[in-house]
Image (cartoon, rainbow, N blue to C red):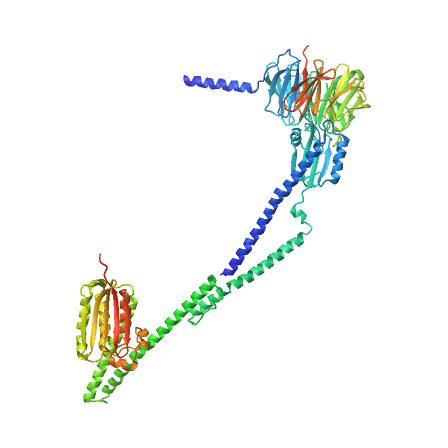
Amino acid sequence: MKKLSSKIWSLIILFLVITVVFMSLFTNFLYDQLYVKDSEESMIEVGERLQSNYQGGKVTDEFVEKVEDFNMYSTFNVFAVRNPKELSACVPFEIDYDTLIGPEERRQLLKGEPITKIGYEERFEREVISVIVPLTDQNRLEGIIYLYYPLARITELANNEVIILISSVVVFSMLLAFFVHKGLGHIMRPLNELQHAVEKMSDGDYKTRVNVSSKDEIGKLSEAFNEMAAAIQSEDEDKKTFLATVSHELRTPISYVKGYSEAIQNNFIEGKEKDDAIQLIHREANRMERLTNELLQLAHSNRDQEKIDVYPMVISETIRESVDLLKNQSKHKEVEINLELDDSLIVQANEEKLKQIFINVIENSIRYSNKKSLIYILLKASGGNAVIEINDQGIGIPKDDLPYITEPFYRVNKARSRADGGSGLGLSIVKDLVKQHNGKLLIDSELGKGTYVTITIPLMEEL
Amino acid sequence: MQRKLLFLLILCTTILVGCRDDQFPSIDQHQSFLASMNILEPSMTFYGESGELIAEWKFDKGYSGALIVNNHVLFYGHQLTEADIYELSSGKLVSTIKTGVGSTNAYYDLTYKRVFITNSVRNSVTSFDTQGNKLDECSLGEYPMSMTSNNGLLYVINYKDSKLSIVNIDTMDLHDEWTINESSNGILIVPEKNTVWIGGHGKGNKANRTVDILDLKSGELQHQLDVSIMPVGFSRSEDEIYIINHGSNELHATNLDGQALWNIEIGANPFTVANFNGNVVVAGFDDHKIYILNDQKLIKTIDTGSGPFQLLVREVS
């Protein structure tokens, strides 16, 4: 595979070659347009000035001498010709020599028009620009003034130094190619680092980070990469912690079940002890069942983040049903639940999931309430939302633990929790379910006084 | 019926158009004229005794020269394979002679009633009768061109050679060869003085400035006549000889002995001179004009076709 830097390098070299070719063509064009045109114009001007000295009649020796004199000081080669043979005067007859001007040129000169030619002239054995000015009198071509200038093409000019020229071009191109290569390497280095980092990431090394040395596109890409790497790393760590917690949570009841069942099998315990052990095995099995159910729920609530079936429903009904379902538990703890519900509020929700939210929250409240205390449940409308406040007079949560209270298996007091029978997943499930209903979950608490849970679910918009 | 009429109409039109292609304005048999053969845009222009235009014949073919014999005119071309004979009184093409490429000149001998055409490809001269039937051919030197005849002998200058060939008209055998300059052009025999006058361009880029006068019998150089630049054409009156110098645009007149009488600068690059109706006529190749002189003075200038190269005269008494 061709590297990106090689592609850019080739592109730059290609542009360079195109530029060199274009410049040489352009120079040639300028040479033709400016140098050649300029020479032509000044030659015509000189020719016409010399022509103005011709008084008509035969071209005299004095005139020829005058032109020759001028030639000594002129930058062009100038001479006057009056030999009719050189002027193609014999042309209807076949001629056995090269004339200075051809029959077509003679005809043009007879009209009094000057002639300009560029090309190889056999007479001068080289490429020349030549201008021919006629000396005419009464339709007679008495002579011509011939001006020419060697056409030293740029290549011809540089002919002697052609080796130096070519080698300097080669050296210059090589130097340029080298520096472009180096420069590209410098520019491409962060990209190469990034590529190595991505390779390391894909091998599972989530601690990989790259140096951000610039603020350009590559710098921004490096920053984004670092953020992404940090996110993946934290996610990975969360996953490991979660798995460790789940294993730990399951291991304890399993060891109880295993231990007591072995003891029963081997008849180590008898009578009431055996009954207690069987009850304990049953309780631990229930705990495991509940834990796995809730794990399943959590997994579902995560997976079904975006697709739950919602429909209009009266929210106060659901709250009442939830409270009814928990009647035994509240009675057992002698906790009184006070309801103050606005029966007119209708929300778009899934009844089952909504009930799950309230059961989890109210169950928690009952669980951590002091005996013979009160739980207030208030439902009201506020700012287009149904707001449910659940307020207990329980043990409360320490301030430091509040931010983590909705994370799976997070417990304020691990030693106490298992006795409470909670799995540590309830609030995580609540948080996900509230989110599925586009609602909000707020938990505030005062240690020793009680906890305030506020759930906000958007009201159904009236049509 | 209507179809037949239409067909006849188309046929007639085609025939008429076809006829017109080969027919030029006619020239009266009793008309004396001066004709100019113009070769840049091939045409022949005919002028009457006072220089008035009688007719103009324009050609599609690239004729480079012509020869007038009584009521007929023969046109030939260096690049053409055949020469065409037209009848002047009708302006119609009457016959065509196969010549092959390279015809350089045509000449008519009055005594033997023979037409001679020189050829620069075959380097020969071919004789024809007045009906245009080929009679005989004789090989000559390089590029035979200028011709004249005297007393049963045809004198031919070989333009790219250094010899003049003399051919017996009757037998068409080579009679003699004389050494002359290369690039010679223009020949005139003066029987009264037993001399042959030969002009020329000069070899290479060196312009010739003399006319060589040779002895008619021996071919020996009698003397060189200094004229101007490149004398290439002659004509004569009873006692004067006219020499046209195309390099210097000068007409020189001498007596039959070659003594200079007068000269005049005339025309632009004139190649030809003729005598017509007591006047001397010169054609300027570059300025496309015909100049009529009388008694050393220019009496008339006529605009003619492009590139007049030959002046031909028919004088009917």
- Judge by depth and name the residue closer to the eye, B188 or A395: A395
| Position of B268 relative to A329 (above/below) | above
Write the residue at 77% across / 15% down: B239
- The answer to whether residue B305 is above or below residue A463 is above
| Quadrant that contains the C terminus of chain B | top right
Tell me if B33 is positioned left or right of B20 in this view.
Answer: right
Residue A217 visible (yes or no): yes
Hey, which quadrant is residue B220 in on the image? top right
> Is residue B252 in view?
no
Image point (76%, 37%), residue name: A69
Please state the horizontal and vertical placement of residue B241, each as a whole percent of the image. 76, 18
Q: Is residue A15 above or below residue B231?
A: below
> Residue B150: percent from the left, percent from the top?
75, 17
> For residue B203, which quarter of the picture?
top right
* Of the pair B63 and A57, the residue shown nearer to us: A57
* B174 with respect to A458 (left or right): right
From the viewer's side, name the closer residue of A176 and A44. Answer: A44
Position of residue B266 measured from the top left corner of the image (x, y, whole percent): 71, 22
Quadrant the N terminus of chain B occupies: top left
Q: Is residue A16 above or below residue B211?
A: below
* Relative image position of residue B34 (x, y in whole percent): 66, 16
In the displayed structure image, the side of residue B8 where residue B214 appears, left or right: right
Residue at 64% from the left image edge and 10% from the top image edge: B30
**Number of marks in the image?**
0
